[in-house]
Image (tube, rainbow, N blue to C red):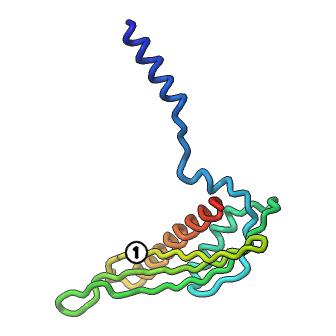
Amino acid sequence: MLKKIFFIILSLNLLTHCEYKPVYSKQNNAGLKIMISGFTGDKDINNFIASNVNRSSKNESNDIVKINFNTNYTKKILAKNSAGTITDYQSDVVTTFVIRKDDNTENFVVRDKFNFKKMTDKYEEKNYELNIKRNLANSISQKLILRLAAN
């Protein structure tokens, strides 16, 4: 009986002193108004990044951050079979951000890669590649927002 009471008190004590915070908790508390002043590069990825950043921007905030970015997307041949036909691709995205807040300017580069197999149906492969671009843009925008929240 005494062991059970001791175990309950010990477990409650440990649980109340545990400071659990979600990984992306700072992202929602950034409290910044993010304005995209311009972007160049791959149109699809840029539109996905811009919509993700605008979604997390707080329009009522007085802290204004202006962002300009350039996205370079390349699709490389990763592997071929013995007949010489392509079997694997690698998508590389390099995004360079120029972040302006007040009088400070900061450059920030994000690189992401994704490997995928070639599909026999060209239409399905194009849709799959667009889905890959969307996922890479989500990853890049999450990294940007976390970087802005940390500053």
Residue 90 in the figure: left or right of residue 147: left
> Where is 6 relative to 121, above or below?
above
Q: Percent x, y for residue 40?
A: 63, 86
Location of residue 66 by image quarter: bottom right
- Count numbered badges in the picture: 1
- The front one of 89 and 24 is 24
Q: What x and y, as percent, mark residue 108? A: 59, 75
Residue at horizontal 49 percent and vertical 84 percent from the top: 73
Quadrant housing residue 21: top right
Which residue corresponds to the image point at 33% horizontal and 87% vertical from the top-left? 77
Type of residue at label 1?
Phe
Q: Depth check: give the residue in front, 136 or 102.
A: 102
* Quarter of the image with the C terminus in it: bottom right
Furthest toward the top, the residue is: 1
Left/right of residue 103 with respect to residue 110 in the rendered view: right
* Extreme residue in the bottom direction: 84
Query: For numbered disc 1, what is the local secondary structure?
Result: strand
Of all residues shown, which one is farthest toward the front?
A: 104
From what the image shows, is residue 106 above or below residue 20?
A: below
Location of mark 1 (residue):
114
Q: Up-down: is 98 above or below 74? A: above
Q: Residues within 10 Å of mark 1 (few under 14, many from 20)?
A: some
Q: 108 and 81: which one is in front? A: 108
Say which residue appears at 68% left-offset and 64% top-offset. 55
Residue at position x 59%, y 74% in the image: 48
Quadrant that contains the N terminus: top left
